[in-house]
């Protein structure tokens, strides 16, 4: 009944949440963490144990991960970064032959999420508004530019003046020219969504983004607003979705008009706020995948208006030698 948080990095709060919920049911079970450099990972240091794995682009990664899971009697893997999702999904059957469950969405849904144009089509098919994409010879300023396969706000640009556009923007085929959604009129939300084994939505927690640092939310507040009913109406069932999905939306401050931006089918860096508000995804995962009990009831009893303000904290490792 051991759990692995893979590519653990800085996910200290996520590790601790799984530790608390797992030990409530299985006192001797452990939450392990893995990373390419575990000695330098804060999450690895607070886990019940950790181990080193090759980088994701190493051909031996899957074999090494399975061997470590067998060694440490790990039966459930919780991924945390975009680049590992498709790799785990493609090798799902191999993991399951070894009695290991990678908690990832279907391969086809992950591919949709990784391509921003495809996820726009997905939103439209579910009656969710999207920002208009311009052709590069017919656009309106201001505009927002982002890559079709980007993450963590890398290679994104807000263009207000014509002279801000460069040859790079026009020549890079991965860059999308999009309608700019005015941040003075729209609030940005990251929503933590929980889907059960049957791909049905059981919980939606919008978190208003107040401040972001290095692509991860630093200040945020839970908001039980029009987004909850909007998501339930349009994303009630999503083929291939399981566990935690992190979806981004913009909502107009006056009209409540909503735009879908993107979906990451994994735990987001800001999920600890939803957990502390009462949306207990780790417990539900353990209930579904270890106890084989269905999560049937919809959950809306999380705390509205809970503000999270993050700060840096130290984790000390004694006797470390570089």
Image (cartoon, rainbow, N blue to C red):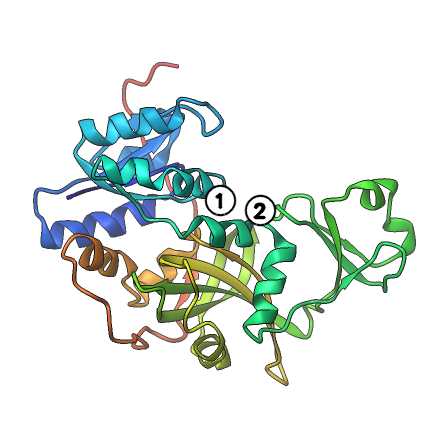
Q: Give me the residue at 32% from left, 61% from top.
A: 275
32 sits left or right of 115 in the view: left
- Residue 19 percent across, percent down from the top left: 21, 47
Q: Tag 1, which secondary structure?
A: helix
178 sits left or right of 318 in the view: right
Q: Give me the residue at 82% from left, 63% from top.
A: 142
Residue 257: quadrant of the picture: bottom right
Taking depth in this image into account, of 88 and 50 the one nearest to the observer is 88
Quarter containing the N terminus: top left
- Residue 18 percent across, percent down from the top left: 24, 50
187 sits left or right of 41 in the view: right
Question: Would you name the residue on which mark 1 appears?
Answer: 82
- Residue 10 percent across, percent down from the top left: 40, 40
Q: Tag 2, which secondary structure?
A: loop
Tell me whether circle 2 and circle 1 mark residues in contact (CB < 8 Å). Answer: yes
Taking depth in this image into account, of 259 and 104 the one nearest to the observer is 104
- The answer for how far apart the CA atoms under marks 2 and 1 are is 8 Å
Question: Would you name the residue on which mark 2 appears?
Answer: 151
Which of the numbered marks, if any, corresponds to residue 66? none
């Amino acid at each position: 009944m051991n759990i692995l948080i893979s590519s653990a990095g800085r996910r200290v709060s996520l590790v601790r949440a799984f530790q608390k919920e797992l030990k409530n049911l299985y006192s001797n079970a452990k939450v392990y963490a893995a990373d390419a450099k575990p000695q330098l990972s804060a999450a690895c240091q607070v886990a019940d144990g950790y181990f080193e794995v090759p980088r994701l682009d190493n051909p031996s990664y899957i074999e090494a991960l399975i061997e470590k899971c067998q060694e440490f009697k790990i039966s459930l893997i919780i991924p945390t970064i975009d680049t590992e999702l498709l790799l785990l999904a493609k090798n799902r059957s191999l993991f399951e032959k070894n009695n290991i469950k990678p908690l990832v969405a279907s391969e086809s849904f992950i591919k949709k999420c990784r391509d921003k144009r495809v996820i726009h089509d997905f939103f439209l098919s579910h009656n969710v508004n999207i920002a208009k994409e311009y052709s590069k010879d017919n656009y309106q300023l201001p505009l927002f530019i982002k890559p079709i396969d980007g993450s963590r706000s890398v290679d994104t640009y807000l263009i207000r003046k014509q002279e801000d556009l460069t040859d790079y923007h026009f020549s890079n085929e991965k860059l999308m020219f999009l309608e700019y959604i005015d941040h003075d009129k729209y609030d940005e939300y990251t929503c933590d969504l929980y889907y059960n084994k049957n791909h049905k939505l059981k919980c939606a927690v919008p978190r208003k983004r107040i401040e972001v640092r290095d692509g991860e939310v630093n200040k945020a507040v839970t908001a039980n607003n029009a987004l909850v009913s909007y998501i339930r109406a349009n994303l009630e069932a999503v083929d291939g979705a399981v566990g935690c999905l992190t979806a981004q939306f913009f909502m107009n401050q006056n009209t409540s008009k909503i735009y879908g931006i993107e979906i990451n089918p994994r735990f987001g860096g800001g999920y600890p706020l939803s957990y502390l508000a009462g949306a207990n995804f780790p417990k539900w995962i353990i209930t579904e995948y270890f106890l084989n009990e269905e999560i049937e009831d919809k959950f809306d009893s999380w705390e509205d208006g809970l503000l999270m303000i993050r700060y840096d904290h130290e984790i000390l490792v004694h006797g470390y030698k570089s």
